[in-house]
Image (tube, rainbow, N blue to C red):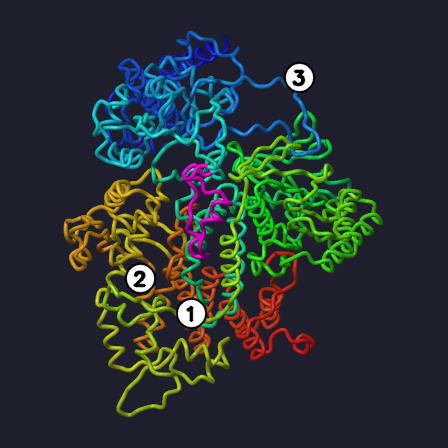
Amino acid sequence: MKQRLTGLAYLLTIIVILVGLPAALVAVGSPWPARIPAAGDVWGSLTSPDDGRLALAALTVLGWICWLVITVSVLLEVAARLRGTAKAPSLPGLALPQSWARGLVAGALLLLSSTPTDALATPADITSSHAATPPATVTAPVGPAASTPTESEPPAATHSEPTASITVMQGDSLWALAETHLGDGREFTKILDLNRDVLGDNSAMLKPGTILQIPAPAHEADAEQVTVKAGDTLSGIAQDALGDADKYPQIAHANPDLVHDPDHIETGWVLAMPETGTPRANSAPGESAPPPASPPAEDTSAADRQAKDPAPTAAVATPRSTTTQTQTPAPTSSRSAAPSDAAPASHTQVPAPAWAVTGLTGAGAVLAGGLFLRRRLVRQRAMRGRRPGRTIVAPSPEMATLDRTITHVGSTTVATIDWMDNVLRRVAAATTDGHLPSLIAVELATDEMTLHLDQPMPAPQPWKASGDQKRWTLPTDTDLDDVGPHAPDHEAPWPMLVTIGATEARPWWLLNLEDLTLEVTGDQHCAEAFARYLAAELAVNAWSSHSRVHLMGIGSELDGLNPERMTTHPDWNEEAAAHFLLETIETIDRADDLDADVPTLRATGQGQDAWPARALIVAGTPSSEALTQLEQTVRSAASRTSTGIIRINPDHPSDEAMAVDIDATGRVRLPRAGLDLDGVGLTPDEARTCAQLAAEYRRQDPAPIPGITEPAQPWQNWSDAAGALREEHTLPRDTPADEEATTISILDAADEDYLHTGATTEEDLAALSPQVPADTAADVQNADPTLDDDLANWWSDTCPAPRVTFLGPVSVRPANGTPVTERKAYWTEVVSYLALHPHGTTKGDLATDFEISDARVRTVINHAREWLGTNPATGQKHLPDARKGPAAQQRGVPVYELVDVLTDADLFRRLRIRGQARGPAGIEDLLAALRLVQGAPFSHLRPGGWSWLTEGERIDEVLTHAIVDTAHLATTECLRTGDLNTARFAATTALHAAPYEHIPQLDLARITEAEGETEAADELVRAGICNTTDNDGDGPLDLPERTQQVIDERAWVRPSRQAS
């Protein structure tokens, strides 16, 4: 009944708009004059005092226009329904009113429903029909006892029929979706019933990007399904799904109700894949199959990977099978290579490519996110002390696969785990009195977080508590200020939260190891892999910064991952265990004195010292009095020990410990909690490689800026990757003058002048401003005759060439191509990739770097080609046929390349090298280059993409160095000449591009001092450099050598200077 009333309301709304609005307008009167007015009449009406008639006439005209637009939109929509078409034709400029009309008509059609839906039970979560594993049964939160549903909370009804997932596109309605996928628009109630938890009461207006479940047609129930995305072709889907593009007729035959023309498929269609004769590795939900007696041959669990990995370099490239247990399946079965720009849907993760390090995918993505943050932190520390003209050595090539995995997976999870860390710190900061909840576990997804508590506790706003008050849930779109105050220096209240696994419904389950004895039993290899993973997370998680983990008899491969937090012992160490016990007892005594649990003491900042946490991971059953006492102590002083114990396959498991069982496939089961998870794990080689990469990133060895190994333009024959003249084309700055060989230098004054006026060193001047032979300078300038024209085009509103921005948020501005309305971030990455490969790239290389099939490459290239448009100089596409481009002709193989496309990165480097070749006059070129900078290079990248950027030369880092060094040159010269405004522009530009580098910060301090603000300059150095931290709760970092040298030479922050 409610549904019919809703439909009646929509119908009445349409009648009011189509009939009532014109009736009201007629009653107001005609806005048109009875006769054609003379010019004098018009002028008189406009200049005479308004009595309201002119405004009323204008509003009446506007009303008639609005009525006409809405009426046309509604009539088009009704006509489309009568013809049986899913969508009405789109009219230019009428997208919004057509969307309204579509919703109104769809809502009115509710009157035609013959099945009442209000009485149906809310459906339970329905998983994809080709999920990797059956849904895990979670009967209770982690805790000592399982809770059962009460009579007031009846279990939700479940749907046994198979379903498929679709993504709502712009303009979709339930009626249109039912017509497209179910063959009859009147079947829309079936879609509505399956998605009441998503749609609520607003079923007539669908939001683009929403994931909906639809009933799978009978002939598709047992087949794999693929949802068509924009740009898909039937042959491309056949290549991806069936392994052969020529098998597209089989897909057409399997979908006779949809595919009438193989050359025409529509976005949103759900296509059934024909049976290939190969049994699927998984069953549909609701089916049960006996577990195999042993792991399948293709299953590469942690144990299998350990047995098969022959060497560390091989370990990082070993993929799991395609039905990997730790990978949460996506909500749709789309094969599209171009993800949506919209926020990721609930409970989804970016699928891991085959080359990814398996231990860092699926549930292990939290570790990838932690390593991502740790890498960024360590790299920024190294860059702070970088000297001009130098870079920091990159990791060895053997680390490339792991480094790329961290970028690919970690970039997609870092926002979620950082949000969780922020929320929990705010919870602690909001606890000024009382107690924190007794946290056992965190259930984390991309759309919400649930805290599982040991004891019931009322949930403060904006948390939502379960009926038993043991589960608090918070959506990710909550205003964090409602949770608690921002407290970046606040101790993390639960520093020993670590990921233990994942279910299909939730990407991550994190267990609080503090005050817990965990006994891991089962398959030895998988149990050890599980323990290595826990230790690795404790070593890198941001919220575990003050934790210590000791591994005894296990985990030696992790040695070096983070020496500040982790200590490995090859065997049992009684002395270390005794010290561990002593620290635990001291913590208990301190907590007893204050009569509170440790998390609350952390939250409220009580005590004279911090409350560090510690974990002991032990393999086997050592004969140890210290271990026995430690276990008894942890069990008897719950919540006050700040200690966790993890034992791997002890000889005599304890009934008092929390049991974790791991089988040979890596499944993790916690019987007491009713959890059955895809477990985490690191093989020995994966752990060893993670530790080696972390050690390499901690190195801060300087290295020269790399050269351009394969120049594509004449100017590149002279330039390094940052746009500076290569050393072999210059002379040392202190070379004596030669009457027969004229040289120039962009900083042509004496070193003493620059050292007196600037914040620089002799080493800086030698690196950035060597002498350039006059004939070399002329050759460099002659090598780039079109630079000024290209720069003018870059700034022109009528630039004929596409423009790609790298020196700031990455973007593409085509000149005349087909506009992109969807997946713009993905196509931007594709075009950027091509722009950074001036010699072109093969289909195979692009397929590998974007993790797509060769067939999909053609579709992707076609989208990029149409977006970039036609080159007016040649009449050909800016992305030409792979066989006909200049690089293809030169290399003799088909390659994809961009022709006549401008990038700010190349313009910057061209200006810099020409400026260096022009001597003192070249400062203008340097300033022109700096005007191209819009922020930090390569910022706002698509999460889950750009992993190829970490391979080989780190162009993102090199261009950042180029900006800082160019700005330092310009600033140093402007300080000498007294042009402080220009100096400040240059230094500020560099600081925006590299806010963590000390070079621009010191330059700004010197400019401030030159402006007469001596105390302000001192404060900039003291607060911005000397006392900066990494927001990890620790003290300021040691000053790099160059920074200390400049501060000493300028006599900044000296006590004697303050006193004067």
Question: Outermost residue toward the right?
Answer: 593
Q: Position of residue 474 (x, y in %)?
A: 60, 35
Residue bearing the label numbered 3? 152
Q: Which secondary structure, mark 2?
A: helix
Q: Residue shown at 31%/67% (left/top)?
A: 708
2 and 3 marks in contact (CB < 8 Å): no
In front: mark 3 or mark 1? 3
The span from disc 2 to disc 3 (Cα, nearest Å) is 67 Å
Q: Amino acid at mark 3?
A: Ser
Crowding around mark 1 (Cα neighbors within 10 Å: few <14, some 14 to 19, many 20+) is: many
Q: Amino acid at mark 2?
A: Asp
Q: Position of residue 796 (x, y in %)?
A: 28, 55
Span shown in magenta = 296-324
Question: Outermost residue toward the bottom?
Answer: 739
1 and 2 marks in contact (CB < 8 Å): no
Q: Position of residue 840 (x, y in %)?
A: 25, 55
* Quadrant housing the C terminus: bottom right
Q: Amino acid at mark 1?
A: Asp
Crowding around mark 2 (Cα neighbors within 10 Å: few <14, some 14 to 19, many 20+) is: some
